[in-house]
Image (spheres, rainbow, N blue to C red):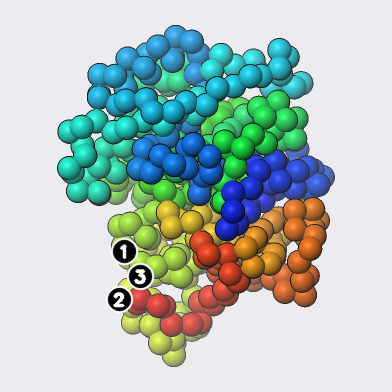
Amino acid sequence: MCRLFALTSTEPVSPMRAVRALDVMREGHDGSGVGLFLTGLGGPLGELKGCPILSGILTHDGEKRLNKLMDAKGFTLRHRLSWDLPATPPAGTPRRDVYLVAAYDVPKAWRDLPPAERELNVMRTRLELKHMGLEREDITVFSFWPDVVMVKEIGDPLAVGQYLGVDREDLHARQILAQGRQNTNYAINLYACHPFFIQGICTMTNGENTAFIPIKEWLMSCGVPGYEGYHSDSEVFTHILHFTLRRLGLPLEAYKHVITPLSDADMQGHPDAAFLEQLKASCRKLIIDGPNCVIGCLPDRTMFMVQDRKKLRPGVVGGRPGLYAFSSEICGLDAAIPERDKTRDFQPMHLDTAIVGPGCEEIEICRQTQQLPQAR
């Protein structure tokens, strides 16, 4: 089992606020690892608009190889976080050579490219670095994207968070996703640690995706760069969301109709019945078979939670204007935002998508029985 916690705020907050919420829920996860996704960054990184930020872990030799490749491609280093770590890591956490968070100016040749082409080039660079690192196990890249930092490590989430000093102001962010657990079903692999990310889209999941293999095979057959790896059965949730938004051009409210479509009987009388029937038939291979609770964040910093049809994983959303949280358990929500109206907490059921927009004004509930905002 793992536990999830996410914060969305109008002002940058410390990632330790999310890590401490995970610690309150420690009976629900095994303390084997932590993953953080940060966007809406404050500090120097938040000022570097449009500069992709590289996040990862490297050996000293890997760092040399990475720098050589970035120089050859024409990337210019703009800002790099310095790490002053204790001499001894926490129990169970490996001693690493380099934790990297570095922002770059893109190559001059890219600057006049259409945004979609420039974004594709940035993603291809991440994949190139990842593949290069897998050859010698000296470069692990979690993300390479503007206004995004990702941290992943093995060990107790609270101990790792304190060791890495994620409370530092230059890692404060307006949107934070945190997951407590490494991939302990198989061999430990940092790429298998949630959250997962592609082109500004991030998700993390509590549960087991029993339809993993057919979904993975279908996604890999699409020929979309980035639909690869799959060290965890939950990574497909991120890619299905990417496919829904980027390839199909549909709104977030359609995501549930892709992963958990309505039954044929329930679809009758729906205002978008004809479209939903076509979507269900076209995306049948992407239907999940849980139990799963998914929390995600979109490029515009909208945050959401959905459940599968079984609704066997806990999940709650609550907060106040300016600060909301998505949590596996109410105790995590209580720890992070005790000063809220608890009567307004919401636990999504199998038809619901709970959404908090980037303005953090309120919780919006979209049900699959409602008309899609941009049905086509």
Picture quarter with the C terminus: bottom left
Residue at the location (59% across, 53% down)? 11
Q: Amino acid at mark 1?
A: Gly
Q: Is residue 192 visible?
A: no
Residue under label 1, please give it.
249
Residue under label 2, please give it.
376
Please name which of the two marks, 3 or 1, marks the residue nearer to the observer. 1
Q: Amino acid at mark 2?
A: Arg
Left or right: where 284 falls relative to 106: right
Nearest to N terminus: mark 1 or mark 2: 1
Indicate whether 177 appears above or below 188.
below
Graded by Cα atoms within 10 Å as few (under 14), some (14 to 19) or many (20 or more), the crowding at tag 3 reads: some
Graded by Cα atoms within 10 Å as few (under 14), some (14 to 19) or many (20 or more), the crowding at tag 2 reads: few
Indicate whether 300 appears above or below 90.
below
Indicate whether 29 appears above or below 256.
above
Q: Nearer the viewer, residue 14 or 223?
A: 14
Residue under label 3, please give it.
279
Please name which of the two marks, 3 or 2, marks the residue nearer to the observer. 2
Nearest to N terminus: mark 3 or mark 2: 3
Q: Is residue 189 visible?
A: yes
